[in-house]
Image (cartoon, coloured by chain):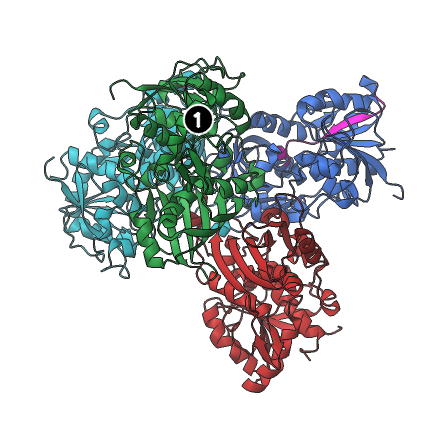
Chain colours: A cyan, B blue, C red, D green
């Protein structure tokens, strides 16, 4: 790929925007050519406009770039959107209409029937919705979305199990890191030595997006998977890494051994495995009694591998297990970039 | 009650033992006359033998008491046991055989069919097992136990709901404070900014003790309740207060309104409500969207009231909700003392 | 005091405002008759306008009060100000000019030469500046301030030592709790598992206010104490309680024993000791090797006693020691209330 | 270096031992050929004998190695010691007497007049003490030590300043991460939401080792530097990275600008800069108002660069500043490995 694809980051100064910046420096496919932020920040150097919340400092090659206002004339072919849902709802279609490929981390358009919601190892075939999207909306560009951070980890674990044993029911309880709320996000007085048993809108996203991701596309129609998910979302005093507890019921009650085998063998399609951001193994199964843990396991596979452990029988359904997903890498910016890499390799970026 | 009942605390220097000390100073019914600890500590002043982990300092009236070794000749009528399970299993029967009334916080004997496992507001009638216990074992004394810290909160919430709607299934995920592991307990390197998705033996205790507490005593036999509980226990970086997420299925599917009404109206028997450590309300229902929280709600009712909130429909069963229980007060030492108060008021302490 | 003095709280919905509310319920001298907050909150019930950040809930007697806008016609004789400095600078003089007695926790007017900056046990005689203030400014009311939260603890420890041994130099390093920054205050992403080595304006306040508090009033002039203070302020992941490390040099080099004796014997004037919020002992000396600690010692004396420990020789100056002060009680709202109690008992509230 | 030097790790299962393991995998100079641990662990596979406390898992190439007991017949030329001081005091001389080169992280022998205490960028010439050590003790091997974790950061910042301006006085207050206490180390009940204002022996180490490191070796005698250090050590709820506040007085009072220039230009000798573990810059100067911070800055230069910021005038001495040092990398295992690299490059490893 001799000429890199030019990309812009929308909402580049926020917590997810910063992850995009960090990950796109020296990317083999992409080159950052524009950054946008709110009116207030436009015109400033990136390093001045941004309170960098990731350990270390903004990359030197980006630090001096001037932040643009959010308008649809950016010197880029692809845009990554780290915009808030409300803004994204209005802005992202404008970019698609103007011919950009949009890879969005926002929830705004995930539920539109012609907008793919994709994890490359889970449902790469949903990209075929792009064709319908462009046709129905008469857009030269298009929009692809990645799921909510918790849902990403959940769907990756459920995918091989659903394929093998047909999932019917999933009880889910999350313990989510504060970085998921952005910056400034959760006030320290709310979370130091404390738990918040509520994250606005999160439970609905988990309950819905999981079904979309594991659904099928038939004749250009996305058909939701038929299992039912019930979720409780909690915020915990952890900086990065969501920990998620699952109780699962299947049509074909699998044993613990069968389950571990299926999880261990899971991998994406060959073309997905070869993408630059794809980990060697999308899942990793822990057999230690007290793993996975967010601080110890979130960075497995450069934060792209989901760890799953404590696979054991449930007294009420078939199985219990616990997973950890890095919420701002696999569950946000890096997930969105992996989608873009798939788009590039599949020829969607022309 | 002009003459107070003399009491000893077994394992008085540990984290739960310290709570007993704190709560029994100036108690209207009881007077601490002996403290025991391990061989190493025996013979020392309490304040020297003990690393006090509760905010503040050991009460002056206890600080100078000399710690005794653990043997069954203590100047006391009643003993509170904060012993580890293994030691308790051997020692508590010796004390009962020597004529002491034993109120135990240990799990060692909770599952013996003639040893009451009691929360005064939930199953005070289980104390009738004492008669059988003394007769079958030919003991002048007896043993009464209180449940595991998490189970205490769960059973208090489930009791009125089970009575009203007949519980069938309960999915439970706990987020437990580090004080539940005693001192030194959980190393800080394991839990700062981290979650441990495993607490040895905890899930089994929750799954079993809940059924015992909500069971019935018929003709001297304790019959377990018939619902099924499936539990996942997690340790979180919170000092005190367990937060517990529930999904519940009932025979008679209650509405959210009916559920809140039943929870709000719950109270213990008149004789229980009048005990010194009994709170005005055993349960408190939160209607705010993000409550209960451990740091903000664990101390309601002096740590004796269980807070419950987020009562809402579950997509798979009838209801979801979240509770907070103070694990070292209601869930341990203060729960044991409330049992002793009930024993005193019911005439078991002669 | 049969008729209580009516009081208003300015900025009642903020973190310090909430402490005022909590502490003034059932106060023997004062009765809350008005609450103010920003335009946006005015007209709402207190419990709706306020995100309560203190454990528990707003007191029922205040919860239903309607919040007023910030204007100088409040049904109260005394106002407690928990306003931000900038607002306070404009508003507090208006209240004094309108005849109110103002007890302010804000820094805005602390350095005015005719505005007393007072800790009752340290410099109650500075209240004599009120007379000059009223005369020079032609105000029927007046303003009294309490110091910055860190400074309060420092000045209370330094006062008896300066009186006895004449302080010359003080090196100070603080480790301050997040509640000192108000709500929402410090973002959790900045402080979980982290230290912030900077708090805007704090070092200057410590360096200056300490000299004012330990200065003298001579003929209506406040003369600063002549020692020099050098301060470094840090924010740490602690909810409440500031921990402060000191190295001190005196004219008369005291021994550790003399120092401990002087600290232990320190008490306020008789009329101060009898005030409702005054603790039995303003200082408490810890002799344990690892105390004081914020979580264990902040609540000594209802949060009104400053704990000091690790008194030992310094290799460079005379002494090293560490103190803990409850920053939102003694160091803010309760300190302001203690000032008001002194004003009442000294006849300033007519 | 075609044939790697064989190395053993003494105390390989502890927290510092694990860092040695992590850092020595794929090291260009060294190859791990033996691991020792306590009697209890000997004979087990490393992965079974060790509770891995670093994020991730033990490296596969080491996981299966069998742990040896602690005796002086190891298939290695060099040993890294992560032993507790008391054990090190007895064992390390035995290894030196048996012909091993010992690089010790323990404090046991740091103060022996013929044992070099070394940071390669600070005092590489102290290695000349080895000759005397071998001669006086008649050892075929030898011992070299690295300083205490806090002292490492302090000495690296003081070195260029002392050379340029002649240090006279240093007031030091540390805020140290829990990983410095090893595993299990600090109980979570002691440190969650809390500060411990005491670390046994730490202040004495800082006060003494700083003078040794900045001292000179003249005719085989180590002469301490003549400045005086006064230290207060605190433990804070941070996992890794010590934050240290300094007030410094010099003979030649430098300006802030001069100081920043000297710090920025500091570098080790050419032969040190070329070592594999040496960072590009031993120091990094932060100009942002609120840096350095442990979570954001500990990993600069792979954890080998010390960050220093808030350089500003002190009201009492010349300068105030704050530094962050990674305590288990530069301040422990990686510092010890850098010493070994210097030994190798200087020909001490034959």
Of D211 and D22, nearer the camera is D211
Is residue D72 in sight in this rendering? yes
Give the quarter of the figure containing the C terminus of chain A.
top left
Q: Is residue B215 above or below residue A39?
A: above
Residue positioned 53% across, 43% down in the render: D203
Q: In terms of depth relative to the viewer, which is nearer, D251 or B16?
A: D251
Disc 1 sits on a residue from what chain?
D
> What residue is pinned by disc 1?
D133
Which quarter of the figure has residue A38?
A: bottom left
* Residue B52 picture quarter: top right
Q: Within 10 angstroms of label 1, few (less than 14), some, or many (20 or more) residues?
A: many
Q: Is residue C13 visible?
A: no
Above or below, B134 against A155 in this view is above
Determine whether A79 is above or below B338 in the image: below
Residue at the farthest front position: D219
Q: Whole-percent x and y of residue C143?
A: 57, 76
Q: Bounds of the magenta span?
A: B139-152
Task: Give the SS element for disc 1.
Answer: helix
x%, y% of residue A50?
Answer: 30, 54
- The answer to which of A37 and D101 lies nearer the viewer is D101
Please say whether residue C207 is one of the residues in the magenta stretch: no
Q: Is residue C272 left or right of residue C234?
A: right
Looking at the image, residue D115 sits to the left or right of residue C255; the answer is: left
Please tell me which residue is depicted at 36% across the width and 58% down the height of the picture. Answer: D256
Instruction: Give percent across and percent down for residue D149.
Output: 45, 38
Q: Nearer the viewer, residue A330 or C253?
A: C253
Q: How many marks?
A: 1
């Amino acid at each position: 790929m001799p000429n890199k694809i030019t990309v812009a980051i929308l909402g580049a100064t926020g917590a997810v925007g910063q992850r995009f910046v960090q990950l796109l420096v020296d990317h083999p496919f992409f080159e950052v050519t524009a950054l946008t932020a709110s009116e207030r920040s436009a015109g400033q150097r990136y390093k001045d406009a941004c309170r960098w919340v990731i350990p270390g400092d903004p990359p030197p090659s980006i630090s001096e770039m001037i932040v643009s206002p959010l308008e649809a004339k950016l010197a880029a072919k692809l845009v990554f959107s780290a915009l808030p849902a409300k803004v994204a709802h209005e802005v992202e279609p404008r970019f698609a209409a103007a011919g950009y490929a949009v890879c969005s981390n926002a929830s705004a358009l995930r539920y539109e029937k012609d907008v793919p919601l994709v994890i490359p190892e889970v449902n790469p075939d949903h990209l075929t919705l792009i064709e319908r999207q462009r046709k129905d909306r008469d857009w030269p560009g298009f929009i692809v979305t990645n799921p909510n951070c918790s849902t990403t980890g959940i769907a990756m674990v459920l995918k091989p199990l659903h394929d093998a044993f047909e999932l019917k029911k999933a009880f889910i309880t999350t313990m989510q890191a504060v970085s998921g709320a952005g910056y400034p996000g959760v006030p320290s007085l709310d979370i130091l030595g404390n738990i918040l048993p509520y994250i606005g809108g999160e439970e609905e996203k988990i309950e819905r997006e999981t079904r979309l991701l594991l659904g099928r596309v038939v004749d250009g129609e996305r058909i939701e998977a038929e299992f039912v998910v019930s979720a409780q979302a909690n915020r915990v005093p952890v900086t990065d890494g969501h920990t998620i507890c699952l109780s699962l019921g299947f049509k074909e009650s699998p044993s613990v051994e069968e389950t571990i085998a299926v999880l261990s063998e899971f991998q994406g399609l060959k073309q997905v495995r070869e993408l630059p951001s794809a980990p060697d193994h999308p899942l990793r199964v822990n057999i230690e009694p007290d793993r996975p843990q967010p601080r110890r396991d979130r960075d497995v596979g450069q934060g792209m591998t989901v760890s799953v452990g404590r696979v054991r029988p449930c007294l009420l359904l078939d199985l219990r297990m616990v997973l950890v997903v890095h919420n701002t890498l696999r569950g946000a910016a890096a997930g969105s970039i992996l989608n873009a890499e798939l788009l590039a390799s599949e020829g969607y970026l022309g």
